[in-house]
Amino acid sequence: MTGIFGNNGGSSGKMHQFDRFRIALRGGVRTDAVSIGLYATDASMYQMLPLAVLTPLDREDTVKAIRLCAELGLPLLA
């Protein structure tokens, strides 16, 4: 699982970016509140909501996700 983190402001433009992930990847791209909430914490008291959660299927999917994050200027946490 990979989380894409960043500022939630201006989410309409972000949704178009996530559509690009959905087209490029065979794995999942989750932007629903439940998935986001599950990955917002690391068992500490701090929370940071990801913009999306990616579930690449294999190495090729992972490489595509990393390249797309770099192209779009989106930070990620693996």
Image (cartoon, helix red, strand yellow):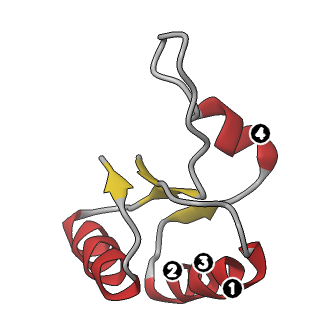
**Residue type indicated by callout 1:** Gly
Residue where numbered disc 3 is placed: 18
Picture quadrant of residue 35:
top right
SS class, disc 3: helix
Q: Give me the C-alpha separation between circle 4 and circle 2.
A: 19 Å
Q: Verify CB contact (< 8 Å) between mark 4 and mark 2.
A: no
Q: Give how far across and how far down residue 3 sits, in percent.
A: 45, 51
Q: Give me the C-alpha separation between circle 3 and circle 2.
A: 5 Å
Residue where numbered disc 4 is placed: 34
SS class, disc 1: helix
Residue where numbered disc 2 is placed: 21
**Residue type indicated by callout 3:** Phe
Residue where numbered disc 1 is placed: 13
Picture quadrant of residue 65:
bottom left
Q: Verify CB contact (< 8 Å) between mark 1 and mark 3.
A: no
**Residue type indicated by callout 2:** Phe
Depth check, mark 1 against mark 3: the one in front is 1
Up-down: is 66 above or below 4?
A: below
Label 3 crowding class (10 Å Cα cut-off): few <14, some 14-19, many 20+? some
Label 4 crowding class (10 Å Cα cut-off): few <14, some 14-19, many 20+? few
Q: Give me the C-alpha separation between circle 3 and circle 4.
A: 17 Å
